[in-house]
Amino acid sequence: MANEELTRKLQGRMQPEEAEGRPEFAPCAVPAPEPEQPVRSPTASADAELSAQLSRRLDINEGAARPRRCKVFNPFTEFPEFSRRLIKDLESMFKRYDAGRDGFIDLMELKLMMEKLGAPQTHLGLKSMIKEVDEDFDGKLSFREFLLIFRKAAAGELQDESGLMALAQLSEIDVALEGVKGAKDFFEAKVQALAAASKFEAELRAEQEERKREEEKRRLRRAAFRELKAAFST
């Protein structure tokens, strides 16, 4: 009995010592997996750009788009192949059909223009004409886009049966001033004759001289009127 009791006491002492000698390990926290970064495909940027363009086109159609600030348009520098006289004649034609005086030719004004030129177009045909040169997708023609019609005609980029080619061929600029049969030949001749910068400067000087002569004529008329008035006063 004494031996059994001694054995139990020894075992009771050994168990706490073994427990104290064992290292205690805190449970390791398992790190959460990091979220995977989305991989951008090579066409992602192109798709985003196209989406932005389509969204702006939709906003324009709904009248909700903010106007973009654009640089000042100078036809004489952007269309150096055209003479100053030609650009002014085209500007006069553009203003003649700009009934709204807003600096644009809309679909109804283009319809009237084509009817007066003797080449009436359907509604879809008119929309197709505008779309071919409509750079800002506003559904109407600015003066710059109007000039693009004649540039494309000169470069042979218009189909012979298209409404834009009919506009270029039937415009009074072609018939009344130059007397040629086709818009393409007419503008090619202009490009060859007036492409040099010296020619441009000569035209500018000629315009200045013409203005001086007109001013001198007005001055002489005013002087003659004053003399005539003075003669009646006496």
Image (tube, rainbow, N blue to C red):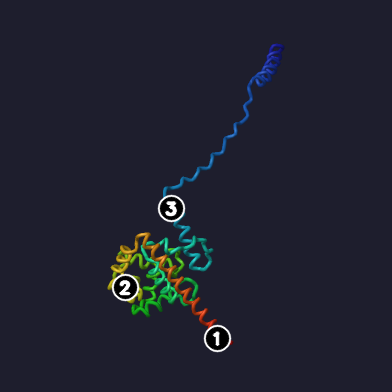
User: What amino acid type should be assigned to the residue bearing mark 2?
Assistant: Glu
User: Could you tell me residue 217's position as x and y percent?
Assistant: 47, 76
Residue at (48% x, 65% y) in the render: 58
In the image, 212: left or right of 122?
right
Q: What is the secondary structure assignment of the residue under circle 1?
A: helix
Q: Would you identify the image quadrant in which residue 186 lies?
A: bottom left
18 or 88: which is nearer to us? 88
Establish if 105 lies above or below 39.
Answer: below
Residue at (53% x, 85% y) in the render: 228
Quarter that holds the N terminus: top right
User: Could you tell me residue 33's position as x and y percent?
Assistant: 54, 39
Residue at (59% x, 31% y) in the render: 28
Do tag 3 and tag 1 residues touch (Cβ < 8 Å)?
no
Q: Which residue is mark 3?
A: 46
Establish if 31 lies above or below 233.
Answer: above
User: Could you tell me residue 223's position as x and y percent?
Assistant: 52, 79
Establish if 31 lies above or below 149.
Answer: above
Q: Which residue is mark 2?
A: 178
Q: Which residue is mark 1?
A: 231
User: Residue reaching furthest front?
Assistant: 234
Quarter that holds the C terminus: bottom right
For disc 2, the neighbor class at 10 Å (few under 14, some 14 to 19, many from 20) is few
Mark 2 / mark 1, whichever is N-terminal: 2
Q: Which mark is residue 151?
A: none
Looking at the rendered image, the disc whose residue lies closer to the viewer, 2 or 1, is 1
User: What amino acid type should be assigned to the residue bearing mark 1?
Assistant: Ala
User: Could you tell me residue 153's position as x and y percent?
Assistant: 33, 67
Q: What is the secondary structure assignment of the residue under circle 3?
A: helix
For disc 3, the neighbor class at 10 Å (few under 14, some 14 to 19, many from 20) is few
Residue 157 appears in view: no
